Amino acid sequence: MKLFAGHIWTLRRRVMTLCFAVGVVLTGLGLAAAIIAAHSNDHIDALVNRTGPMRIAGESLSTALVDQETAVRGFAISGKEASLQPYLSGRIAQQQNIERIDKALGPDGDPQVRAALQDVQRHADAWRTAVAEPVIAGVRRGGPDAAKAVRLAADTTTFDPVRTSVAQLQMLIAASREQSVDTARRTAGQLFVLEVTSAGIVLIAGAVLLILLDHLVTRPILGLAGQVRAVAAGNYDQRITSGGSPELRALAGDVDAMRRQIATELSEVREARAQIEWVNDQLKQQADELTRSNRDLEQFAYVASHDLQEPLRKVASFCQLLQRRYEGQLDERADQYIAFAVDGAQRMQRLINDLLAFSRIGRLTLGFTDVDLDRVLTQVASQLESRTGVDGRVEWAGLPTVEGEEALLTTLFTNLVGNSLKFHRPGVPPVVVISAEPGDREWLINVRDNGIGIEAEFADKVFVIFQRLHPRDAYEGTGIGLAIVKKIVEYHGGRIWLDLDVDEGTSIWFTLPAPVGVSAEPDRPTEPEQVPEPDHAAEPESDKEARR
């Protein structure tokens, strides 16, 4: 991006420059501190390992020399060899302390201290040669009364150079120690100054960084966030800009480009929404019109079937009267005509009754309750006992409790079981098996028989009202039974389909809602693709004939 080209001071560059400068300064201070600390360690080492031991050894050396001088004078007076013991141990201590001081000095020690140590050694040797050894020898030869030995021992002036040289040595050692102490203090002060300086640099760098972040990041981000919130609140014409670092200015440009894109797409969405709302209004009007039309059709079917009952009953009654009164009195053709009229009137009555029952489904309701299907099947089996025959069977076990209207569900199973009994194979006792499987907030019910079955090509046709698959003289019925079953199932919010994956007979599946709180994962049978949409309802008795 051109924004970051050339010498533009981006936030990253500024922060890196600041960190680099602080790092360089702190590195320099660290090196200086390391050098000063090394010097301080040297001085502390000299103080601990040199001047301290030398001072102690100097005092012990002075004590050893004084012990020698005292022991010589005591021996000159008493003449006892025991009095020389301090002299002998003093000579050993003298040599040991001189070696300690020399070792502490090292090869690069203070030359003045080394020279003073040599003076002490020389004066001590001179005193021992001039005084100590002659006195000891004289006393051993002449005894304590050796006048010359006593005088030599009593003369302390010969020992004064030794005392003076020892005092000079101790003074130089003390001066060296004080110098080491002063140097250590000075280096400690320098280290403290470096530490304070480093802390000050870090604090200043932190303050500069905070000011930099506040000026280039925090405030611009707050301003940018306010503009974004304004856009999010619906002000899509709000232009988004930002000051601060070049990165934030670029980010503000990108966000503004996104805002413009969103505003453009939102305008398109609003136009599309307006079109969709218009289409929805049209669909709602059409749906309302269709609802009114269906209601009018149901009302018409109800009124027509209800109002046609009376004249149709009269026609049927008079035709039956004619048949009973004049049967055999007219010719054969007249009897046939009268029979046709009676049969037509009776079939019309059955059609109207079935149409009236079909129109009443969902219009007259008592509300849904928990219905025990075992109890419903017991009633249905009792009603159809005469049609089951001696060898026929209607079997079920462990049927669930579902949610629905018991009267409608009784009609549903009456039609399904009745159809299975009606369309049995000649010479084969009918067997009807009703089973159920749990589903997701529903139950899958299966009614299967060993009858004549239904061809796959008629899978859709069997659920259409007044559709028959067999001639009227082969099986009785109006062809509305399965249409009633389908409407009952759909009224309960279920779906119905014909299972084509059976070897013999007919298998019909449908769903019914489970009571509240009952739910399970079912092992659903696969619905064949030729099967009607899963909103088809179960079929009634006379409709099963239609499906045949």
Image (tube, rainbow, N blue to C red):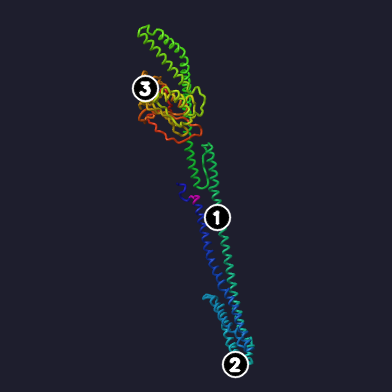
Q: 541 or 31: which is nearer to us?
A: 541
Q: Earlier in the sequence, mark 3 or mark 2?
A: 2
Q: Earlier in the sequence, mark 2 or mark 1?
A: 2
Q: Residue at x 35, y 24 (%)?
A: 427
10 magenta-colored: yes
Q: Earlier in the sequence, mark 3 or mark 1?
A: 1
Q: Which residues are magenta?
A: 8-12
- Between disc 3 and disc 2, the foreground one is 3
Q: Relative to 218, is 520 above or below? A: above
Give the dominant element type of the magenta stretch: helix, strand or loop.
loop
Q: Residue at x 59, y 65 (%)?
A: 189
Q: Measure how far apart labels 2 and 1 are at the Cα level.
A: 89 Å
Q: Residue at x 56, y 51 (%)?
A: 211
Q: 146 or 272: which is nearer to us?
A: 146
Q: 4 or 258: which is nearer to us?
A: 258
Q: Quadrant of residue 345?
A: top left
Mark 2 secondary-structure assignment? helix
Q: Amino acid at mark 1?
A: Ala
Name the residue that disc number 1 marks. Answer: 205
Mark 3 secondary-structure assignment? loop
Name the residue that disc number 2 marks. Answer: 141
In the picture, the quarter occupied by the C terminus is: top left
Note whether residue 533 is visible.
no
17 magenta-colored: no
Q: Measure how far apart labels 3 and 1 are at the Cα level.
A: 96 Å
Q: Amino acid at mark 3?
A: Leu
Callouts 3 and 1 close, C-beta under 8 Å: no
Name the residue that disc number 3 marks. Answer: 469
Q: Amino acid at mark 2?
A: Arg
